[in-house]
Image (cartoon, grey):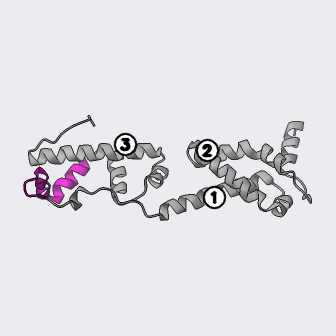
Amino acid sequence: MGNAQLQRRDANHRPPAATVDLAAVARAHREPLRGLALKLTRGHRAEADDLVQDTFERALARPAALAEVRDVRAWLGTIVRNLHVDRMRQLAARPSAPMPDDRAAPVDAGDRSASWVAVSSEQIAAALAALAPELRQTYELAAQGVPYPVLAAQLGVPKSTIGTRVLRARRKLRRTLLGALGERGPEPWPA
């Protein structure tokens, strides 16, 4: 084992001390913890920085525990992981805002949207089946009320991608169903 490896090991494994230089701990472990947090948050820098800050806040609130830890980096890494898991659970448990539902709006007899009543569940199923798999999966989960941040974590894509996929799926479904009804709706943007 070389000198650099011994020094690195000694920085992580040290005998308990009565006091801890908190600034030195933060300097020594900030970047590795940020790297771990970036992996956990799939590259979301602000969320990763929040995790690291909350980790140090939690660790510094318990200086006696910090002084007794043999492997500081591993202990701090465990705090980062636990905080991340707690946040994901909170997101999953938080009731999401209801998604706009065109079917919930009252139908005006003179309104062209009254033809939506004529759409059968078989036509809807066929239109869903015609979507690209990633659009269909994202749309179905979003329609079940799964929050976008949770969907993004489950599918391994950025939250903005979830919104884009849902928007594209809605447009394609609308176009397909209007075609089944023999109508043509406005197409402000290509899908």
Residue highlighted by disc 3? 164
Type of the residue with mark 2 = Leu
> Which residue is found at the position 48% from the left and 47% from the top?
156
> Horizontally, is 184 left or right of 11 in the view?
left
Spot occupied by residue 183 in the image (x, y as percentages of width and height):
10, 44
Q: Say what secondary structure mark 1 lies in.
A: helix
Q: CA distance from mark 1 to mark 3?
A: 29 Å
Label whose residue precedes the other's in the sequence (2 or 3): 2
Mark 3 Cα within 10 Å, few/some/many (few <14, many 20+)? Answer: few
Q: Which mark is residue 93?
A: none
Q: Say what secondary structure mark 2 lies in.
A: helix
Spot occupied by residue 171 in the image (x, y as percentages of width and height):
25, 43
Type of the residue with mark 1 = Leu
Is 18 above or below relative to 181?
below
Q: CA distance from mark 1 to mark 2?
A: 13 Å
Q: Say what secondary structure mark 3 lies in.
A: helix
Residue highlighted by disc 1? 83
Q: Is residue 47 visible?
A: yes
Q: Which residues are magenta?
A: 108-130
Label whose residue precedes the other's in the sequence (1 or 2): 2
Which image quarter is the N terminus in?
A: top right
Residue highlighted by disc 2? 38
